[in-house]
Image (spheres, rainbow, N blue to C red):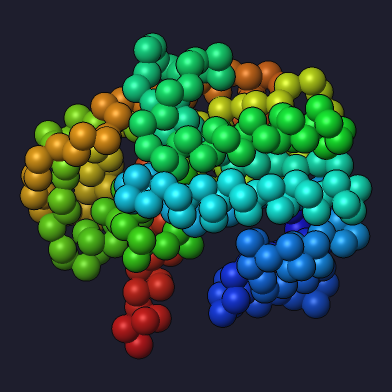
Amino acid sequence: MLAAGHTLRIFERPRVPPYRQFDAAESVEWLCGDLSSTHDVQAAMQGVEAVLHLVSTTLPKNSNDDPIYDVQSNVVASLHIMNAMVAHQVRKIIFISSGGTVYGNPLYLPIDEKHPTNPVVSYGITKLTIEKYLQMYEALHGIKAITLRVANPYGERQRVETAQGAVGVFLHQAIKGIPIEIWGDGSVTRDYIHVSDVAAAFLKALQYTGPQRLFNVSSGIGTSLNELIAGLEEVLGRRIERRHLPGRSFDVRASVLCNALARAELCWAPAIPMLEGFARTAAWMKKELAKSAG
């Protein structure tokens, strides 16, 4: 966004510092607050032209443990955003939804935007609910709401302490010499996309003026856990130790998203091959681990 010349206001939780130092020439305002606070959200919305909604307080694997919290902290908080947009006449929002959970068990592959939505975890249900509210607010208030159903993003700056994101978690453990735990036989297949490609899709969606409102953002390529580990081994140049555990009931066997609509309408396409993305992520992670060790 900065490279494209945009002025940014970042709304983040308290006590979360900026992820890097911004140059004086970069127009960035960093605000702290709580999405459940009407006051905080209203203050953050003043003077903006568009919103990029990237917040989620839960993860797919634990969202079923407390679905009430999932709804209160994500759906209700998102309604605070929408109401603030109406109050301040902000006309555009780009929402990051979940291509990996809103569709549920696929009826066919690759999954396109017309595929039925039958999420099996609360995380997917709340994402889908927010999508529907955005449609309602567009109909009632003229807000242009674009949803990006993102596959499985990975890359530099991904937080590994949440144990979310196979690429980041596996790389972190492999670099530290910790065996990787695989739930099942390793055949579970996902669609992995580098974070820079996701960022490029957001920029394209912000510029988009066409009629579509929903896009899959994905590599369009299915990669099993076994194939993922083989790719990491190629990047690291050594074998990675594995430990197999029983499969989990909530894991969808295969999820691969069709990105043809985003290619046609947004003029977007993923640009980072998987091994290059793994290498970039590994280089960043090694650097971070060296800094923490020092």
Camera sees residue 240: no
What residue is drawn where x is 46% and y is 36%?
124
Residue at the extreme top: 108
**214 left or right of 206 in image:** left
Q: Nearer the viewer, residue 235 or 293?
A: 293
Q: Position of residue 160 (x, y in %)?
A: 36, 62
What residue is drawn where x is 54% and y is 55%?
73
Quadrant of res 43 = bottom right
Q: Position of residue 276 (x, y in %)?
A: 43, 45
**133 left or right of 208 in image:** left
Instruction: Classify 93 as above or below 257.
Output: below
How many labels, in total? Answer: 0
Instruction: Classify 259 as above or below 123.
Output: above
Quadrant of res 28 = bottom right
Residue at the extreme front: 68
Q: Nearer the viewer, residue 258 or 2?
A: 258
Residue at the extreme bottom: 294
What residue is drawn where x is 63% and y is 54%?
77
Q: Nearer the viewer, residue 291 or 205?
A: 205
**25 left or right of 229 in image:** right
Instruction: Classify 92 as above or below 2.
Output: above
- The quadrant the C terminus occupies is bottom left
Instruction: Classify 266 as above or below 206.
Output: above
What residue is drawn where x is 19% and y is 38%?
248
Q: Position of residue 5 (x, y in %)?
A: 83, 55
Camera sees residue 114: yes
Q: Position of residue 289 (x, y in %)?
A: 34, 74
Q: Nearer the viewer, residue 281 or 64?
A: 64
